Image (cartoon, rainbow, N blue to C red):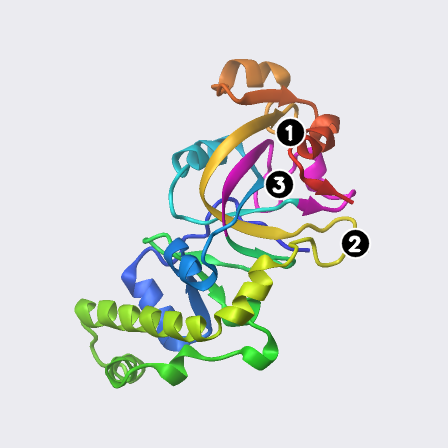
Amino acid sequence: MIRLKPLVNEVYNKIDNLFSTLVYSQTYLPISIPIIKKMVGNIKTTKVAHVTTYQGYKQLEKLQGKKKGISSFNDLGSSSQLLKGYGVATDGGVIAILEGKILINSDLDLYSKVDGQGRNWIATSDIFEKGDLFFVDDYLPKEAIEIRKKKKYGKEVTQQEKRDYIKMYIDTATKEMLKRKDIFRKQYLQPYGRYDTNDDTTWNEIIVAQMKIKEVAFVEDVEFTKKGLETKVKMPRNGIIIQSDEVPKFLKKHGIKIS
């Protein structure tokens, strides 16, 4: 079962963290709207659902129109706990319907990370098939290799060198991805249903950016009682209060597949 992140799993918001990760593990690729445009041309827009808490929803509001990727879904099994309004990485209670630009669609959890610039970092193996896998490390320029050696040998690396390395890594990764854009495009354009259709507790994952919240449902008795929702929650114009058994109807209304 995949575990949807509550919003964005932002652990690379500091240069030091991202630099260390890219030095010791050359298996991640940067994904952003500019890169996706280069890979596929027109970026598709879709409607998806995201489950969070009330506090998570307040953060989600602030991310509208931003470049940061949001983990979401549009296909789930009929026995999923999401259908009761419960989350996975969070307790849930709030179901937001989003419309955004697709960065990546997958039938499995991507375990993506987000850096301070809004780029999603995703494992190469989650984007390319076995025969098309590659390591950015094999294509880095000499200057980047020298910086990486300094880090691995315990020598001091300046902040400017870290920035230079990250830029060279991103430039190299983008160049190699563009060489394989036909392969990437096939996955990007394929249907994005959930992986195990025989397991009615699973769901797929779609990462969207520059999203808008179309409608939001606050599920009674998951995080707040009905009275609590009416008195403690600042209800947005596009917000409604529903009971847990009304979640499937709410999702289906917005085109979310339940099977």
- SS assignment at label 2: loop
Q: Is residue 120 visible?
A: no
**Highlighted range, magenta:** 75-102
Q: Crowding at label 2, few (<14), some or many (≥20) Cα neighbours within 10 Å?
A: some
184 and 83: which is toward the camera: 184
Residue at 27% x, 73% y is 165
Name which residue type carries label 2: Asp
The mark closer to the camera, 3 or 2, is 2
Contact? badges 1 and 3 (CB < 8 Å): no
The answer to whether residue 213 is above or below residue 111 is above
176 and 69: which is toward the camera: 176
Farthest front residue in view: 41
Residue 153, percent from left and from top: 29, 85
User: Which residue is denoted by mark 1 in the rendering?
Assistant: 222
Q: Does label 2 or label 1 sit earlier along the sequence?
A: 2
User: Which residue is denoted by mark 3 in the rendering?
Assistant: 87
Q: Crowding at label 1, few (<14), some or many (≥20) Cα neighbours within 10 Å?
A: some
Residue at 47% x, 19% y is 234
- SS assignment at label 1: loop
Contact? badges 3 and 2 (CB < 8 Å): no
- SS assignment at label 3: loop
Name which residue type carries label 1: Val
Number of the label disc, if any, that sits on residue 199: 2
Number of the label disc, if any, that sits on residue 134: none
**Count of marks placed on residues:** 3
27 and 186: which is toward the camera: 186
Q: Is residue 81 left or right of residue 155?
A: right
Q: Is residue 38 left or right of residue 71?
A: left
The CA span between labels 3 and 2 is: 18 Å
The quadrant in which the N terminus is found is bottom right
